[in-house]
Amino acid sequence: MRLRVSAGLLLYRTRNGLEVFIAHPGGPLFPNKDDGHWTIPKGEAEPGEDLLATAIREFEEEVGFPVDRSSKFIPLGMIQQKGGKIVHAWAVEGDIDEAHPLRSNTFTMEWPPGSGTMCDFPEVDRAQFFPVAVAQLKLKPTQLPLLERLEQAIQNA
């Protein structure tokens, strides 16, 4: 079995303190799940693919907003999620017009299970900036170290 490796971006801004842009998973399994289910926009890397390039591509595909490739990307290291997936992450400062509609790529799955009906669902159904204290409640627990590393990097800058 191939180790699953993903890469993602944690977009941040400072308005009324530090805020981070995180995403809620789309599909039929998550509409009523909130705290502890949000994630940084991320996606799987192909073998040998540059992980920062993967993170940028996946951010753009999952939320539909371009990333300024000339930005300073802060390496946040890696974490391992509950299911075993390894996630490499970078932080980048930026802003998004949240009034602009989210455009996410889609995935196909059988729904309802056992029905034989294949349905398309967005990978992300919503994404927004949250103050770090709120993001700590929203994010998957295994991704919380990424917030801590971002705060540390900003303090040390």
Image (cartoon, grey):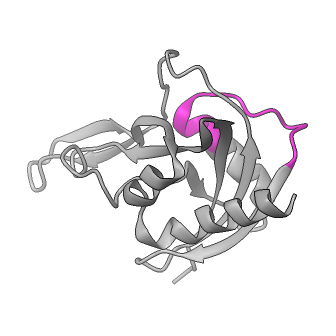
Quadrant location, the C terminus: bottom right
Q: Is residue 8 above or below residue 117?
A: below
The residue most toward the left is: 115
Q: Quadrant of residue 14?
A: top right
Horizontal and vertical percent position of residue 138: 38, 54
The residue most toward the bottom is: 1
Left or right of 69 on screen, residue 41? left
Horizontal and vertical percent position of residue 111: 17, 46
Task: Identify which residue, 16 or 57, lies in the foreground.
Answer: 16
| Residue 49 visible in the picture | no
In the image, the segment drawn in magenta is: 59-72
| Residue 17 visible in the picture | yes
- Is-magenta flag for residue 65? yes
Type of secondary structure dominating the magenta stretch: loop
Horizontal and vertical percent position of residue 67: 74, 34
Q: Residue at x 68, y 67 (%)?
A: 149
Q: Is residue 42 above or below residue 19?
A: below
Q: Residue at x 66, y 73 (%)?
A: 78
The residue most toward the right is: 70
Q: Is residue 11 above or below residue 86?
A: above
Q: How many marks?
A: 0
Q: Residue at x 58, y 71 (%)?
A: 145
- Is-magenta flag for residue 8? no
Task: Identify which residue, 127 or 14, lies in the foreground.
Answer: 14
Horizontal and vertical percent position of residue 89: 68, 61
Q: Is residue 99 above or below residue 93?
A: above
Q: Quadrant of residue 123?
A: top left
